[in-house]
Amino acid sequence: MISILRGAVASVGLDHVDVMVGGIGFRVHVTPAFAQAAPRDEEITVYTSMIVREDSMTLYGFESCDERDVFTTLMSVSGIGPKIALAALAVLRPDDLRRAVRDQDLATLQRIPGVGKKSAQRMALEIGDKLGSPAALP
């Protein structure tokens, strides 16, 4: 498992960064905001989650361990895969997501691309106690 990368940003796309670590380039899928803020040719640290499937090994990257942990928890929901979990973090910060799940705010959860009413309900039911509490109340 690759859990953290530290290296220079070689290139940036809309939804990914290529990070050079020890002469090897790693493509890491990230939120558009993360990609836009990535400083080309400067060193960054990316917290990663590696998803291994029959036909691919894909890295998803985050600014913090907390984002990575929320991503992993989101993927435990039936019907939520890495693309929707990453989209959730593109739309909502971890604490905003925690509040929406805690409050069963389906309208907020449905702002996530690919999440309809049933998926939002599953999120609220299946991970309500797994995400923990928001750092500060609104």
Image (cartoon, grey):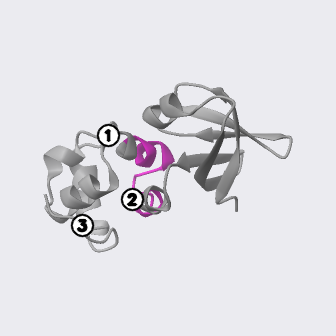
- Write the residue at 45% across / 58% down: 75
Image quarter of residue 112: top left
User: Residue 76 appears at what percent x and percent y?
Assistant: 43, 63
Identify the magenta region: 71-87
User: Residue 73 appears at what percent x and percent y?
Assistant: 42, 63
Looking at marks 1 and 2 on the same chain, the residue that comes earlier in the sequence is marked by: 2
Amino acid type, residue under disc 3 in the picture: Leu
The answer to whether residue 42 is above or below residue 45 is above
Amino acid type, residue under disc 2 in the picture: Ser
Secondary structure under tag 2 reads loop
- Write the residue at 69% across / 30% down: 41
Q: Is residue 119 left or right of residue 102?
A: right
> In which quadrant will I find the C terminus?
bottom left
Q: CA distance from mark 2 to mark 3?
A: 11 Å
Per the image, the residue denoted by label 2 is 78
User: Residue 111 appears at what percent x and percent y?
Assistant: 24, 39
- Write the residue at 71% across / 51% down: 54
Secondary structure under tag 1 reads helix
Residue 91's disc is 1
Q: Which is nearer the eye, 11 or 107? A: 11
| Labels 2 & 3 near each other (Cβ < 8 A) | no
> In which quadrant will I find the N terminus?
bottom right
Q: Which is nearer the eye, 70 or 62? A: 62
Counting the numbered discs, the total is 3
User: Residue 21 appears at what percent x and percent y?
Assistant: 78, 45
Per the image, the residue denoted by label 3 is 125
- Does residue 53 appear in this view? no
